[in-house]
Amino acid sequence: MKNIYSNISKVNNNNISIAINKLKKNEIIGVPTETVYGLAGNAYSDKSIKKIYNLKRRPRINPLIIHYARVSDLLEDAYLNANFYKIFKKLCPGPITFILKKRIGSKVSNSATAKLNTIAVRFPKDKTIKKILKGIDFPLAIPSANISKSISPVSARDVVDEFGKKLNFIIDGGSCNIGIESTVVDLTGVKKILRPGAISAEEIENILKSKISIAKNFKKIISPGSLKKHYSPGIHMRLNQKKSRENEAFITFGKKYERAKNSFNLSTKSDLNEAARNLYKIFRIIKNKKYKLINVVKIPKKGIGVAINDRLKHAATKK
């Protein structure tokens, strides 16, 4: 039987060198991060950025997150401020993305920033992507490795599930530690969170010693995760449900639902971090089982639960 995973490569020095060489040639590769798997390409290359948008079928108004190894690498591309440095010192590298003013003369492709005067930047913690970043002299645009609006991938096989042979090189870094996308914080004016993630508003408030709001509506898209429909398994979904019919998938949480029929439990231990790691895995299992409807129990809105509820809300949006 033909190996359908022949485009997946294990993490070793040779394959990291191959990844670096492909990126230098403006090719697109699949890479692990601590949040979700991404499509990586040269952020300075219009050619690479065009390939990413085409592969993902992503709207051109939706900017990409640009990933860096070091702050010194960012100085030529963004205007940094005191709030950035305070958060960076405490939380980076890690699952947080900063919206900053894009520096005049930046070499980051205008297509990658959706022709905005802002730029979304992150310093990933995953060891593999850090090695790759340190082996090149340009930052990487790395959106999630999925077709636009569909389920984000948390394993190398998920990436194959999304793109098949359209992507010929994927580094297998195992399952993602966090399992949902980074927190996005806008530092260009009034401080606000544009996308909840593993890092909570409370953590950022404690660092900055001031309140920070979570944006609800978006007049202008300056951050990934702002479109109404996202992270979707393509199945009608009902939130905050207490029960489910036998022919419907039932996403549950906690011991109370441990033996529910057609149940897919995010965490029998009521652990929200485990629930976040399992969310997209369960979405993909349910999709592959071809259920027509998903019911989801109420998930606590605390800690990373705020981000889980955000993803569920986007996934349940019809358009």
Image (cartoon, rainbow, N blue to C red):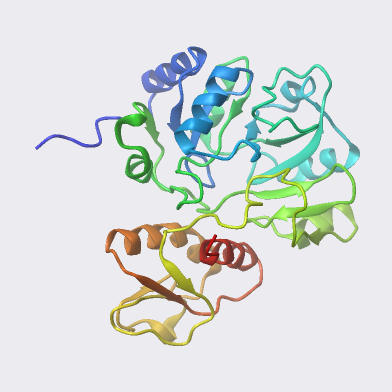
Residue 8 seen in the current view: no
Answer above or below: position of 105 versus 242: above
Pick the quarter of the image with the C terminus. Answer: bottom right
- Which quarter of the figure has residue 60? top right
Residue pushed farthest front? 319
Look at 43% across and 83% down and name the residue there: 255
Look at 67% across and 57% down and name the residue there: 196
Answer above or below: position of 142 versus 270: above
Q: Is residue 98 left or right of residue 153?
A: right
Q: Nearer the viewer, residue 153 or 303?
A: 153
Residue pushed farthest left? 1
Residue 46 seen in the current view: yes
Answer above or below: position of 41 versus 267: above
Q: Is residue 175 left or right of residue 301?
A: left
Q: Is residue 61 left or right of residue 55?
A: right
Q: Position of residue 210 (x, y in %)?
A: 90, 58
Count of numbered circles in the view: 0
Q: Nearer the viewer, residue 128 or 283?
A: 283
Answer above or below: position of 28 versus 5: above
Q: Position of residue 267 (x, y in %)?
A: 45, 71
Q: Position of residue 43 (x, y in %)?
A: 62, 23
Pick the quarter of the image with the N terminus. Answer: top left
Look at 59% across and 68% down and name the residue there: 309
Q: Is residue 296 left or right of residue 111?
A: left
Q: Position of residue 126 (x, y in %)?
A: 53, 38
Q: Nearer the viewer, residue 229 or 171?
A: 229
